[in-house]
Structures are given as structure tokens and as C-alpha cells.
Amino acid sequence: MRRPLWLVDAPEQPKGERPVPNAGFYPNLGISAIQSYISEAHGLPAGAGCDELTLVDGALRSFEEVEQQLDTVPPGSLVGFYAQVTNYGAVCALSSRLKARLGDQVMIVCGGPWGTALPEVILETNLDIDACVAGDGEEIMLRLSRGESARGMNGFFCRGEKGRVDIPEHCISHLDIGPLPPPLKHTATLAPYFANYAATDPGDHRRPTATYFSKAGCHNRCIFCSVSRFGKVGPSRERQPEEAWLECMDLRDRLGVNHIFEVTDSVLPNRCEALAALAPRHNADRSLSFRFYANTDFIAHEEYRFLDHFVEIGGATLAVGFESNDELVLRHAKSGRTTPEQNAKALRQIVDRGLELVAFFVLGLPFETHESLKKTREFIEKVAQYERTTFLLVAAATPLPGTLLWDKYVRGNRSLRRKYVQREDASLVAPVYDVDELSRDYMEHCPDVRVGWDEVRELQLEAAHTRPDVFSVWGTIDE
Ligand code: B12
Ligand code: SF4
């Protein structure tokens, strides 16, 4: 390795406060995936600590601790930041401190959802960041760690002549995840994260938890979600079921995990069936339980027998994006894939089986009216009444960069574009500082939203109070 590599998951930066750890349940998978790939390529030992590759984990440390750790970055290093909506402010502050100390002796690269959605804006507005990566970072970071140039590689954005941003021919980097080492393969321990899970998961549901990452990208185009930006056509982006089980068993035997979050951008109808077919071989004793994300069309679809298969594999918790309970709002936001009838049916089936439920809602989407909010509110109440609902996230719609909402209502609106995309104030370093303000601006400017931000916020607070014992989030962003 020609350059020491530092991979950083910056801590979260809540509005108006000093940044705090982001309370992850397992190490950030984007950073871990790059670590695993580079460790294998260079034959490095497992774990976060070796001279050549250091993981700086904002899920376990405060902003000040991360600052202190980065103060030891030696000249000649390559530093990669995972950046998304909640930590981009911290990424800016940490990059600025690194550059002030090391100048050209450090190369700073920004990846993750924010690097993917906004590479040009970041490079135009933040001179401390040298390059951005849109999409998968493994190959690019490997190349850079060898001291080679990545100019021209898919998804690699950097400054060229006269500081102008060089745009690659292919704006996104895509790897086939099938043959890649699983992200947590090189993780030496997960114990420090288990405490975080215990702190956020109520009651007796405390379990040592990890994740396996099964599929990248989603071909759906929900307008509030930035995942489809990662999932544009590309090579196969799925791990095989047998591999998935082996990875889960490894997490159990090596790291003491007994609950697995399946991280997948969208569940394929046959995914659960394929895993269920292998369950008797791998999980006959039910020593592992699972949490899956699923949409209500899958759950409610008779032919898929999704819930039967889910129970067969040891399924315990379903994380369901209900989003709204109004037909028009759903049709527009989720391309007509789910309906209020499917929501009701899916909820009934989950309750009948006694599964734990994690529920997501988004208020203030296009075509939201007082009437539609009322329908969603009644449905939220039903969800909240179910005693095995363990987590409730009621978000206010926010056009985050990378979403169709952003493309349509921010980029397509002259005054919002001036505020959020074309930086006219050179002192601004972050493309979006304040997500509440962005959400409010969008609701005020979007002719299709017929309710005000205050009304949405009121309903969010009401929902949070419906079940104060449940860990409920009522912020501006969906998961
Ligand atoms: C798992 C997950 C979580 C977990 C994270 C646990 C953890 N410690 O990792 C939990 C449930 C806690 C979570 C919470 C939240 N999440 Co989340 N989450 C995801 C999800 C579903 C998968 C991410 C993942 O692990 N992917 C697998 C890894 C291997 O891929 P990856 O992260 O994309 O990384 C690759 C590339 O991005 C790139 N890359 C990543 N980092 C870097 C760094 C460098 C230097 C380079 C070069 C490349 C690079 O290379 C990696 C390997 O190929 C994504 C959806 C998605 N597809 O990204 C949303 C997503 C990241 N979450 C999102 C949001 C909004 C949130 C929350 C704010 C929700 C909320 N209201 O609380 C919180 C924020 C918490 C926090 N501080 O991070 C948004 C972010 C949107 C945005 N534009 O920023 C996403 C994109 C979903 C969406 N709705 O659009 N989340
Ligand atoms: S919300 Fe889920 S189904 Fe919709 S685009 Fe995002 S990942 Fe796909």
C-alpha cells in the first residue's frame, strides 16, 4: 500500500448541537465493505487497527474523539469519508481541520449517499474535499491507496484544469457484489455496538444484532427515496442465498450475533422463499432471528406466501414502509405499487402471526390533503395500538438530494434551485444545512401539496405521543 488509508464514518450532527455518535448497531457497511475489499487485496490482517488501514467509527465515538483521532493522520495519507444527510456537516468540519493541518499532504475523498447524489455540488462548494465517488467505492479507493490516479474511472469526480470539476463518462460506479467479500468479514468484534442496540430497542427485545447485506439497488422509483440512484442498471447485485446463510452463521459463531437485519434495498418476491428452502440446513435450532424490510404489496400478495417463508427462516421483525394510507398519495409516491387495502391486509397478517413491527410513514407527499392526512392518521393509530410495534418513524416529506422529489421540486423550482443547488453565497459549504428548512420550503413551494408543514409537524408529534413507550422518531427524513 503506497498511502496510509483512513476510512471515516463521521458522527452525526444534529441540528444546533455539537455532533454526537450516530448510535449504529453495527459498523457502517459502506466503510466496512471498502475495508474488506482493500484488506483482501493487500493481504492485511482483520480488525480495525493496522498501520496501513484505520477505521474511524463515528457510531462509537463523539465528534471530539473523532477529531482527536484524525489529528494523528500522518502526511501522505488518503482519507475517505462516508457522507449522508445527517453527517455531512461533520464531514465538512473534519475535512477543514485536516486540510488546515496537512494541506496537499492529505487527499480527502467523499463517498456514500451524499457523494453519490451531489458530487459536483460538493466539489464546487467545498475546496477541502479533493474528490467524490458516486456509487461503489471499493475499486477507486484501492487504486488511490496504491498511489495511482483514478481519473476517468466510473463514478470518480475530481477537479481538473483551473479547478473545474471533471465529470467521468460514466457517472456511477457499480460492482457485482456477488464475488465481493462480505462487509463484516474483517470485523474483529461487534460487542461495542450491541450496547447501542440495547439503548434504542425497548423492553425485552435486546439482542446482539448485526447485518448481512444481500442486494444492492432497487428498480422501484419511490419519489422520496434516493436508493434508486444507486441501483441503476448494472451487473448482478445480489448475494446468493447459500452465501447469505454462511455469512449469517459466521456472524453468529465468530461474533456472537443472534439477530440479523437483512439490508437490502428491496426484497425480491422469491428471496424469502429461497432462504426458507435452506433454513432447515442452517437454522434448524432457530439460533438466529431476522428482521427484513418489506413493502405491503409483497406481504399481502397471496402467491408469494411471503410471511410463511419469513416465519420459516426465523423471522421476528418486519420493517414496513406503509408511508401513507391514501390511494392517490400512494399511487403517485410509490408508482401505484401499494394501496390502502394492501396496507390493511399486511397489518392484519402481521398481527395474526404476532410478529414485531417497525413502521415507517411519510407525511406531506404530493397530493397530500387534510383528508388524506386524516386517513393516514387513523391508520397510524391502528399500527400504534398493536402491542408488538417496536419502532415508529413518522417523517415529514423532504426532497433529499438523489430523490425524484429533489429533481422535481428543488431542481425544477427556480427559487429553491438558487437556494439549494446554485450556490451564490460562497460562505456556504454544505449543499443542505437544515433538513427542517428544506422540508418546509418544499411544502410551501410545491403546488401539489395541499397541507402546511405545521399541520404535518403537529400530526408527527401526536403520533409520537400515541405510544410513548415505543422508540419513535418524528424527524424530517425517512429511513
Ligand atoms: C442500513 C441503513 C441504515 C442503518 C445504518 C446502520 C449502519 N451503521 O450502517 C440505520 C437503520 C441505522 C439507518 C439509519 C438512518 N438512515 Co439509513 N440506510 C440504510 C440503507 C438501507 C443501507 C445502507 C448500507 O449499509 N448499504 C450497504 C453498503 C455496502 O453500501 P453503501 O452504504 O451504499 O456503500 C457503498 C457506496 O455508497 C460507497 N461508499 C460508501 N462510503 C464511502 C466512502 C468513500 C470514501 C467512498 C469512496 C465510497 C463510499 O462504497 C460502498 C461500498 O460499495 C440505505 C439505503 C442505501 N442503499 O444506501 C439507507 C440510507 C443510507 N439511510 C438514509 C437515511 C435518511 C437514514 C436516517 C437519517 C433515517 C432517520 N430518519 O433516522 C438514519 C441516519 C442514521 C445515521 N447516522 O447514519 C438515506 C440517506 C439519504 C441521503 N441522501 O443522505 C438512505 C440512502 C435511504 C434513503 N431513504 O434514501 N440507515
Ligand atoms: S423506498 Fe424501498 S422500494 Fe421504494 S425505491 Fe426506496 S428501496 Fe426501493
Image (cartoon, grey):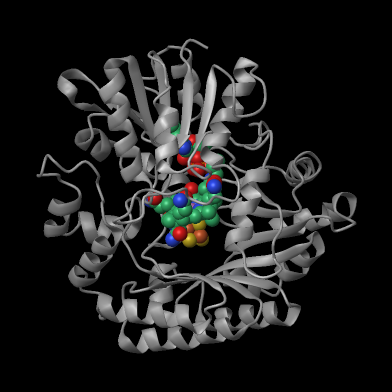
Q: Nearer the viewer, residue 166 or 67?
A: 67
Q: Residue at x 48, y 41 (%)?
A: 58
Residue drawn at (19%, 48%) of the image = 421
- Horizontal and vertical percent for residue 403? 35, 55
Q: How many marks?
A: 0
Judged left or right of residue 285, residue 290 is left
Residue 154: x and y in percent read 41, 28
In the foreground, 411 or 199: 199
Q: Percent x, y for residue 77?
A: 41, 17
Residue 56 in view of the camera: yes
373 on left or right of 243: left
Residue that appears at 42% across and 49% down: 20
Residue 101 position by quadrant: top left
Foreground residue among 385 and 413: 385
* Position above or below: 266 against 166: below
Question: Where in the figure is residue 457, as x and y percent of width and height?
Answer: 33, 76
- Whether residue 218 is visible to the viewer of this picture, yes or no, is no
Q: Residue at x 57, y 56 (%)?
A: 266
